[in-house]
Image (cartoon, helix red, strand yellow):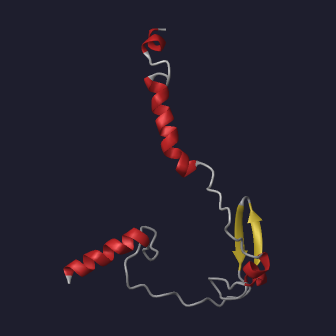
Amino acid sequence: MARETASRPVDGNAFTRFFDRVDSALEPIFGAPPMTGGVEQADAAELRARPCPVCGHAVFEHSFEDISGNIVMTCPTTDRLPERSTSGPLNELGMPAQGRRLDRYEQRSAADH
């Protein structure tokens, strides 16, 4: 009772204000995705005709299985595209760095030379 009377009546007590701040900070991350009004969606037939990034065959030639919520794609051939060579930095997942990480790498290498 003393806690309620000591708090500001407009925005609640310190506990509720804290969680309101946490909610407002996390809303952009965990909230609904932004609306993409005006952005043209790709045609489904065009998406199926795109080449597979693993084998190079069209996507419609592949088979897909839904196993407990995970979709598994099976390529129609055992042939694989050659892996791209990477001469730059890698991110924490071992993939080629992009964005700010790549910019920082280029700035550091330019400063060293």
On-image quarter of the C terminus: bottom left
Residue that extends furthest to the top in the rendered view of this protein: 1
Residue in the picture at 65% in, 87% down: 55
x, y percentage for residue 7? Answer: 44, 17
* For residue 85, above or below residue 108: below
Q: Is 72 on the left or on the right of 109, as rendered?
A: right
Residue 39, horizontal then vertical, whole percent: 67, 68
User: Which residue occupies 32% across, 71% down?
Assistant: 104
> In the drawing, does residue 25 fall left or right of residue 73?
left
Would you place residue 102 above or below residue 35 in this image?
below
Q: Residue furthest left?
A: 112
Q: Which image quadrant is residue 38 in?
A: bottom right
Q: Position of residue 75 (x, y in %)?
A: 71, 82
Q: Is residue 90 left or right of residue 28?
A: left
Where 111 falls versus 81 (above or below)?
A: above
Nearer to the camera, 95 or 49:
49
- Return the x and y of residue 6 as percentages of the image width and height: 42, 13
- Count the numbered circles shown: 0
**Which residue does the image show at 73% across and 86% down from the upper left?**
58
